[in-house]
Image (spheres, grey):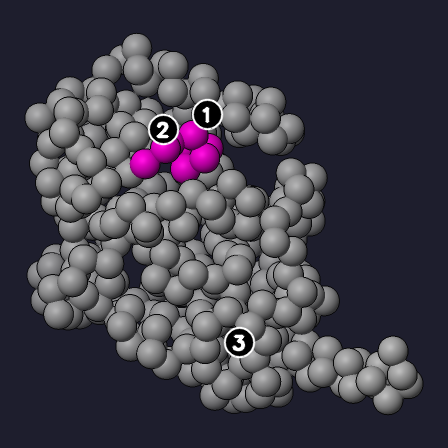
Amino acid sequence: MTRRSAWIALLALTLSIGVGAGSQRPAPRGNLPLRLTDREFWTLSRESSEADGYFRSDTLTSNELLYQQVIPELIERSTPGGVYLGVGPEQNFTYIAALHPPMAIIFDVRRGNLLVQLMYKAIFEMARDRAEFVSMLFSRPRPDGLGPGATAAAMFAAFASVQGDEAVYGRNLAAIQSRLTKVHGMTLSARDREGIEYAYHAFFSRGYRVRPSPTYAELMTATDRNGRPLGYLSTEANFLFLKDLQSKNLVVPVIGDFAGPKAIRAIAAYLKAHGATVRAFYLSNVEQYLNQDTRWETFCRNFSQLPLGPTSTFIRSSSARSGFGGGFVNSLGSMVAEARQCR
């Protein structure tokens, strides 16, 4: 390589990494690894995490029924290839399936959500298809006739007529714990294993009503504004993309307060070091709590450290106060524009 070509390569790398919101050249995926080793996955999760925090509920599933409605606009306005950031449980999977990011980081203030994400990771890896995934998630024997072309509505209707099985639950729980500790070599404390058991038993004992409303079936059969089902279980392709990403250790759960001292900044440093940008950051309604506690500005200073491209996008939820079906509405916002306001 000549000195001039080496200089050009170095300049291109510098521009792709950028510094916070000032970077206006998004890198498609930078030099992010194509997969993380088990050790790299666990180290990134552990070393980016903060201490376990508190939230008023366990939040095992989403309560946002309209969250798919922004997906078409999100895809249109954001540049492909950037990393996905999110918060909470399964709604992240639908956004990930829609955006096809090279990596996803899921924050939550509670260690309990990290354990839920590990439970999902194991089930994604072990299930061969969507029907087997639902069978494992709810500990129900798989009904006959559910092929790769089945709609999510047909699949959940078929499983609704099947009762959970205690023996299936016990075998699956043992397989989940073994997958994490023996296959992946994760160091899980007795309390961690109890947390995974608590979450998994909730799906077994409560069925689709893991929380009062909406049910899991309602979440999975929701649509965008044009009536198109875009959930992560709506197609076999969506499921298989997530299975592949999980199997490569590229969906990484991190314990962290959005306004905390470490988690977001640690991930920002990791992404910058790998020349990656953020494509989307799903916030749910966390900002509501940050504003109540007058901590939004601290969050703003945190996310302004992330390597952003010109189309990096926030996905927000806010209360519509119009009955449950319209209980939360989603909106999109420019991360770059908002990061500039808190420098």
Which is more foreground, mark 3 or mark 1?
1
Q: Quadrant of the N terminus?
A: bottom right
Amino acid type indicated by mark 1 = Ile
As measured in the structure, the alpha-carbon distance from the residue carrying label 3 to the one carrying label 2 is 35 Å
Q: Position of residue 117 (x, y in %)?
A: 45, 42
Q: Nearer the viewer, residue 308 or 37?
A: 37
**Within 10 Å of the Cα at label 2, are there few (<14), some (14-19), or many (20+) other Cα atoms?**
many
The mark that comes first in sequence, 3 or 2, is: 2
Q: Residue 134 lies in what quarter of the image?
A: top left
The mark that comes first in sequence, 3 or 1, is: 1
Answer with left or right where residue 188 lies relative to residue 251: right
Amino acid type indicated by mark 2 = Tyr
**Within 10 Å of the Cα at label 3, are there few (<14), some (14-19), or many (20+) other Cα atoms?**
some
Q: Nearer the viewer, residue 270 or 248?
A: 248
**Magenta stretch contains residue 123:** yes
Q: Which residues are magenta?
A: 122-129
SS label for mark 2: helix
Asked if residue 56 can be seen in this view, the reply is no
**CB-based contact (under 8 Å), mark 1 and mark 2:** yes
Answer with left or right where residue 218 lies relative to residue 341: left
The residue shown at (25%, 49%) is: 235
The residue shown at (16%, 38%) is: 155
As measured in the structure, the alpha-carbon distance from the residue carrying label 1 to the one carrying label 2 is 9 Å
The residue shown at (50%, 57%) is: 104
Q: Position of residue 245 (x, y in %)?
A: 49, 48
Instruction: Please give the label number shown on residue 200.
Output: 2
Q: Quadrant of the C terminus?
A: bottom right
Instruction: Please give the label number shown on residue 176.
Output: 1
As measured in the structure, the alpha-carbon distance from the residue carrying label 3 to the one carrying label 1 is 37 Å
Amino acid type indicated by mark 3 = Cys
Asked if residue 129 can be seen in this view, the reply is yes
- List the residue tagged with mark 3: 300
